[in-house]
Image (spheres, rainbow, N blue to C red):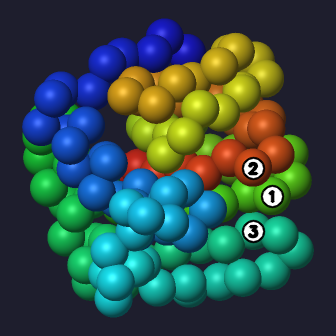
Amino acid sequence: MDPHELPRAAEEIRQEIKRMIPETAIQADQPVGIQAKILEDGNGTKSYGGDALAGKISRLTGKMGIGIGWRFRLVYWSEPTKLLNDRKQGYLIPLKDINLTPGGTLQERYYAEVTDEPLLSSGAAAIFIVPA
């Protein structure tokens, strides 16, 4: 996985999304009442969604030039986890630096095209965009 720097406009939206998630927001930066909704919470993994988050991710993918016909998942993994990627195609956008095995560190401000199923480090928070 070769990391690619996010376009400036996409990075600004990624920062807004980061503030919506308790695991990545700095308390002082977290806006009141504009948090993403927890869709699932089990075994240390939390999936986030909601209209506000979906709108921001739609804008983010537009600024990245991904196009339409893709869906997303925003997940926080408290334990090391294999990223399931049945179609062997997608984009991984970290909300904080994460370690991938194989692949090394994927830093904030970057994204990676994912064609395999890497192991994500514990404490990883990322947006995973896949074909619908």
Is residue 130 visible in the rendered image? The answer is: no
Q: Secondary structure at mark 2?
A: loop
Give amino acid for label 2: Gly
Which residue has dot 2 on it? 123
Task: Give the number of the disc on residue 64.
Answer: none
Residue at 32 percent across and 48 percent down: it is 15
Tag 3 and tag 1, C-beta contact below 8 Å: yes
Which residue has dot 1 on it? 78
Image spot of residue 32 (x, y percent):
34, 83
Nearer the N terminus, badge 3 or badge 1? 3
Q: Is residue 22 left or right of residue 50?
A: right
**Residue occupying the far top of the picture:** 2
Nearer the N terminus, badge 2 or badge 1? 1
In front of the other: 118 or 95: 95
How many numbered tags mark residues here? 3
Q: Which quadrant holds the N terminus?
A: top right
In front of the other: 59 or 130: 59
Image spot of residue 13 (x, y percent):
22, 50
Image spot of residue 24 (x, y percent):
55, 56
State the separation of the CA atoms marked 3 and 1: 6 Å
Foreground label between 2 and 3: 2
Q: Quadrant of residue 4?
A: top left
Which residue has dot 3 on it? 45
Local crowd size for mark 1, using a 10 Å CA cut-off: few (<14), some (14–19), many (≥20)? some
